Amino acid sequence: MRIAILRERAAGETRVAAVPDSVKKIIALGHEVVVEAGAGTASSTPDALYEAAGAHIAPDAASALQGADLLLKVRRPTADEIAALRAGAGAVALMEPHGDRALADAFAKAKIEALAMEFVPRITRAQSMDALSSQSNLAGYRAVIEGAALYGRAFPMMMTAAGTVAAAKCFIMGAGVAGLQAIATARRLGAVVSATDVRPAAKEQVASLGAKFIAVEDEEFKQAETAAGYAKAMSADYQKKQAALVAEHIAKQDVVVTTALIPGRPAPVLVTEAMVKAMRPGSVIVDLAVSQGGNCPLSKADEVVEIGGVKVVGFSNLPARLPADSSALYAKNLLALLPLLTDKESKAFAPAWDDEIVQGAMLTKAGAVVHPSFAAAPAA
């Protein structure tokens, strides 16, 4: 089949859906790859490297999509890109699909078989396709780097002839993929690290990385994890107790990284305005959940806000600040998914409709919206 790779058009997006290594492997599987000119420029991958890998370079998006059987992107296709795809073609991307019935309807109307990488099931067989994890891992790393850059002091303890520099105190809120990488990164930089999470399993993971676990460990805490491994929404009573504990702890911290997200729901508020004002001047808060409302109500998307000397950082796309690595990992996620979208004999676009991974990720099929998350939502 003919696979199109386009330049990302979302503001600030520097990633690309394929890298030369993944292009070579896709071609080795018997497919044709067409890359829009300049698609990899922002991730330090010039067109010449794609050509060397065997891809064709198209002058624009329309040319790349002409006759394409499958479109691979980082972010959701634009209306023009959807319109340029032929009926029956496929589109795979990080669609940001939660609650967006209009996007699903647009794919259905165009008869595009659309898959959202966010909906790939978190099962063992799909780990290599888990784009949320691959991108969150880098986001957690970059969050600490951003915090360290904005913090006006050193992270590690330093003993010098002129005196001792105290180690920074770093608090990670949420110990999922991003949070665990943030813990590991802060530890590598020499900070004294603590972390919190509402999932009981996180306590052992936090401790294994050398950080101190901070949480109200009551009966509700012991039941606070879904079968899929996500944190459950906690009761108002638990949130009040946890907030009191966190408020006391956070006032002593230098850098705070918040990572708490529940798919399809607004981000829970973890750091209140009062907590921010209780922190020492020069402290930094990095809010990874800003795109879903923020774990701190003072954070603003793609801005650094200063409140009483405390910097609140709201970079909404941290993986895009590591475009080469994030593109390489995402390209591997797509490459792992590709066999489930391909007929083994003809190499044509033919999703394995009965496979649980395809069923989990599929938004639209044969002109209809099929994902269960849209079952109760009326068509636009």
Image (tube, rainbow, N blue to C red):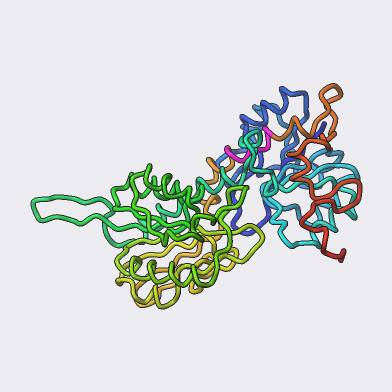
- 230 sits left or right of 109 in the view: left
The single residue placed furthest to the front in the displayed view is: 219
- 99 sits left or right of 167 in the view: right
Q: Is residue 272 magenta?
A: no
Q: Is residue 9 above or below residue 204?
A: below
Q: Main secondary structure of the magenta part?
A: helix
- 275 sits left or right of 106 in the view: left
- 97 sits left or right of 147 in the view: right
* Residue at image location 37% in from the left, 46% down from the top: 207
Q: Count the numbered circles shown.
A: 0
Q: Is residue 332 magenta?
A: yes
Q: Is residue 371 above or below residue 298?
A: above
Q: Quadrant of the N terminus?
A: top right
Provide residue 57's location: percent of width, then percent of height: 73, 36
* Residue at image location 54% in from the left, 55% down from the top: 223
Q: Nearer the viewer, residue 379 or 20?
A: 379
Provide residue 150's location: percent of width, then percent of height: 36, 61
Per the rendered image, the range of residues in magenta is 329-336
Q: Is residue 100 visible?
A: yes
